[in-house]
Image: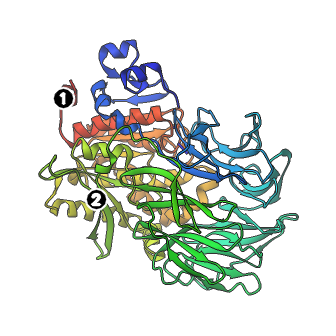
């Protein structure tokens, strides 16, 4: 989900609309929108946008759903400011926009065969209070299906039926109960199962539409699968805890005969394996044991004969097809290189749709005809006229950290012919914390490589997914600061690298990566030049106390329960907020006012404490955004401000003079 609005001035001048109004044009600076709150950010020369704007004129596409009869699909892409639903009728065909909202739209799903609608979800201003809507294809009318106030997510659709099951916080604002609705009649909406906790989601209906598979997530390491009666709501635990081992399950899909279900699980394994459970015995049959990596996702054909799945092999994806009758599988030859995700079988049981993203290509939609092995590309997303074939390819790097463990990441380097010598570095830390950086298209980040000669490092510190469940748990509770030390070891590795400039390092990251940025800024102040935390917590205690109620318990499992005196003492001791006096390098903090995950006050409280340090602090807040910027106009302004920050505090340039 992500970006709307262009103006004739943009088209005439070739610059984003932010760049000009009458007064700003005379001053030759980029004018922020009225929705943006700035503190201490100097006027940004328009020349920055003139050189950088093309890197923001890149689109991407995501596959949402196949038409039930025709070989057509719904995708989400952005042509104005935010992603909207589009119809594509053939490979390489026109992208016909169907929804037109000022906020992002996603989750489009066709009704059953013979119907004439699709459903989708939308929030307002990045607040993530998602609502379901129905779009009637006959006249383009849209109907709000949910209450307009609660958070509604998921959406498992019955087979050849208008009903769908979804999760909603409607009852308490905190618990995610399972609700069912006929999409053609919102008055049928009713709560099926009353639940406790914020991690529940319906994943699939049984072939006879009598049962539901329901996933209960406790943490990244612990989840359970339940079977619920679609009429009475009575539920039964399918995967009870056995012994002391925490087990995680990834989704669940009924087999075609309804006698069992497929899922991914790390039960009896370090990695997520594809497994089949027979309801009669509930003993797992592990289907991918020889693949020593996580199975990231899978999809089952409508006839139940073919399973498509993706294995995440050290951050690189491999697509496989399995014959469910023999359970034999093989990788798909001739696949476009890159990340592969969004697997979606057409009802014809022949066409598999998916998205491919690589270092030289943004996300685009492809299909594979399984009988013939033919690939077809459905979308060709624009790249701002840039020659992406020349973009830097990632290099897998590894380094030893403080306790002898090996940590890995990916390094992108500028063209050495254009930028000889040791290169400045931006270290970009992923969120999650159980996320994982995987090589793909870098979008605007390519500007730093191609135009400024800055190398980029994307580390996967302990606690990242994709490297086994033991590695995933290494940062939990009172081991949180061990992740900081992993970055400290990376900074030393950069210092020793013959091609990187260890005296010119900037650290940045979003969400939990923003927390890591704050932490590195105080723990390794002497090893960096500046930091850019984006929607990042500055104190995990205040985060847990103020994040939205529906996600609080899930985060407590990861960070530790702040109500426990010992945990609270540890979190307060290691909190960047309580070590702010150690930060002596320039900081640029970015927030969204409507962020439900990390309240904007997390950055505000930190900057207020930094005022006494005598350092440069920039602050940017978007009143119409949440956990990250989804609207292109806001992304553009943030990009130009970041370019100025990098040039001034990482590269040591006099930006105002250099941009004239």
The residue singled out by tag 1 in the image is 658
Q: Residue at x 45, y 64 (%)?
A: 335
Any part of residue 537 in sight: no
Q: Quadrant of residue 249?
A: bottom right
User: Measuring 55% from the left and 43% from the top, which residue is drawn there?
Assistant: 93
**Which residue matches tag 2?**
411
Camera-nearest residue between 644 and 156 = 156
Q: Quadrant of the C terminus?
A: top left
Image position of 437 with respect to 125: above or below: below
Q: Residues within 10 Å of mark 1 (few under 14, many from 20)?
A: few
Disc 1 secondary structure class: helix
Determine whether 352 is above or below 365 in the image. Answer: below
Indicate the position of residue 219 as horizontal and vertical percent values.
57, 66
Quarter of the image for residue 268 reads: bottom right
Observer able to see residue 42: yes
Q: Residue furthest left?
A: 421
Give the secondary structure at mark 2. strand
Q: Are marks 2 and 1 in contact (CB under 8 Å)?
A: no
Counting from the top left corner in percent of width and height, residue 580 is at 33, 48
**Residue at the spot 32% in from the left edge and 13% down from the top edge:** 26
Q: Which numbered disc, 2 or 1, marks the residue that appears first in the sequence?
A: 2
Applied colour scheme: rainbow
Q: Residue at 31% of width from left, 41% of height from top? A: 587
Q: Residue 530's x, y, as percent?
A: 26, 45
In the image, taking residue 297 as reference, residue 186 lies left or right, namely right
Q: Which numbered dot is residue 640?
A: none
Quadrant placement of the N terminus = top right
**Please, which residue is most extreme toward the front here?**
372
Q: Please rate how many residues cluster around mark 2, counting C-alpha atoms within 10 Å: few if below 14, some from 14 to 19, many from 20.
A: many
112 or 600: nearer the eye?
112
């Amino acid at each position: 989900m992500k970006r709307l609005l262009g103006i004739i001035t943009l088209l005439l001048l070739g610059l984003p609309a932010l760049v000009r109004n009458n007064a700003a044009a005379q001053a030759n600076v980029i004018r922020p929108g009225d929705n943006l709150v700035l503190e201490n950010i100097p006027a940004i020369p328009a020349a920055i946008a003139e050189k950088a704007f093309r890197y923001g004129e890149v689109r991407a596409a995501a596959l949402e759903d196949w038409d039930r009869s025709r070989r057509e699909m719904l995708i989400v892409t952005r042509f104005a400011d935010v992603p909207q639903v589009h119809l594509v009728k053939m490979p390489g065909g026109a992208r016909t926009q169907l929804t037109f909202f000022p906020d992002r739209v996603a989750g489009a799903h066709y009704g059953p065969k013979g119907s004439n609608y699709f459903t989708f979800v939308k929030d307002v201003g990045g607040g993530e209070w998602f609502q379901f809507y129905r779009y009637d294809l006959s006249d383009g009318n849209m109907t709000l299906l949910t209450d307009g106030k609660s958070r509604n997510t998921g959406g498992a659709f019955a087979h050849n039926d208008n009903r769908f099951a979804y999760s909603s916080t409607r009852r308490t604002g905190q618990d995610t109960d399972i609700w069912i609705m006929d999409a053609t009649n919102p008055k049928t909406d009713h709560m099926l199962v009353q639940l406790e906790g914020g991690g529940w989601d319906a994943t699939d209906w049984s072939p006879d539409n009598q049962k539901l598979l329901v996933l209960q997530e406790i943490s990244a390491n612990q989840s359970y699968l339940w079977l619920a009666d679609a009429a009475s709501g009575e539920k039964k635990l399918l995967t009870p805890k056995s012994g002391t081992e925490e087990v995680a399950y990834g989704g669940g899909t009924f087999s075609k005969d309804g006698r069992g279900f497929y899922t991914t699980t790390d039960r009896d394994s370090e990695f997520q394996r594809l497994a089949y459970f027979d309801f009669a015995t509930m003993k797992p049959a592990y289907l991918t044991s020889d693949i020593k990596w996580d199975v990231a996702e899978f999809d089952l054909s409508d006839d139940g004969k073919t399973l498509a799945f993706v294995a995440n092999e050290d951050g690189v994806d491999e697509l496989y097809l399995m014959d469910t009758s023999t359970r034999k599988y093989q990788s798909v030859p001739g696949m476009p290189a890159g990340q592969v995700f969004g697997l979606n079988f057409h009802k014809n049981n022949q066409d598999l749709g998916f998205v491919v993203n690589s270092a030289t290509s943004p996300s685009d939609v492809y299909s594979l005809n399984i009988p013939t092995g033919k690939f077809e590309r459905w979308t060709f997303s624009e790249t701002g006229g840039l020659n992406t074939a020349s973009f830097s390819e990632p290099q897998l790097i590894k380094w030893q950290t403080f306790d002898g463990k090996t940590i890995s990441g990916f390094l992108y380097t500028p063209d050495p012919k254009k930028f000889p010598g040791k290169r400045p570095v931006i270290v970009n830390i992923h969120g999650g914390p159980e996320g994982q950086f995987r090589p793909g298209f870098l979008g605007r980040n390519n500007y730093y490589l191609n135009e400024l000669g800055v190398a980029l490092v994307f580390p996967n510190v302990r606690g990242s997914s994709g490297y086994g469940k033991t590695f995933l748990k290494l940062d939990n509770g009172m081991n949180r600061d061990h992740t900081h030390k992993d970055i400290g070891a990376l900074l030393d590795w950069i210092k020793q690298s013959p091609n990187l400039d260890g005296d010119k390092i900037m650290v940045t990251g979003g969400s939990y990566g923003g927390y890591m940025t704050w932490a590195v800024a105080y723990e390794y102040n002497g090893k960096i030049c500046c930091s850019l935390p984006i929607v990042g917590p500055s104190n995990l205690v205040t985060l847990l106390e103020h994040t939205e109620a529906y996600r609080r318990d899930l985060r407590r499992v990861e960070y530790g329960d702040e109500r426990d005196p010992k945990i609270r003492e540890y979190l307060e001791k290691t909190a960047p907020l309580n070590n702010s006096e150690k930060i002596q390098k320039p900081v640029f903090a970015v927030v969204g006012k409507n962020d439900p995950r990390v309240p904007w006050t997390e950055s505000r409280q930190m900057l207020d404490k930094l005022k006494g340090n005598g350092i440069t602090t920039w602050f940017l807040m978007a009143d119409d955004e949440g956990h990250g910027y989804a609207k292109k106009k806001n992304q553009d302004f943030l990009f130009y401000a970041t370019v100025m920050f990098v040039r001034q505090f990482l590269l040591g340039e006099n930006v105002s003079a250099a941009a004239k």
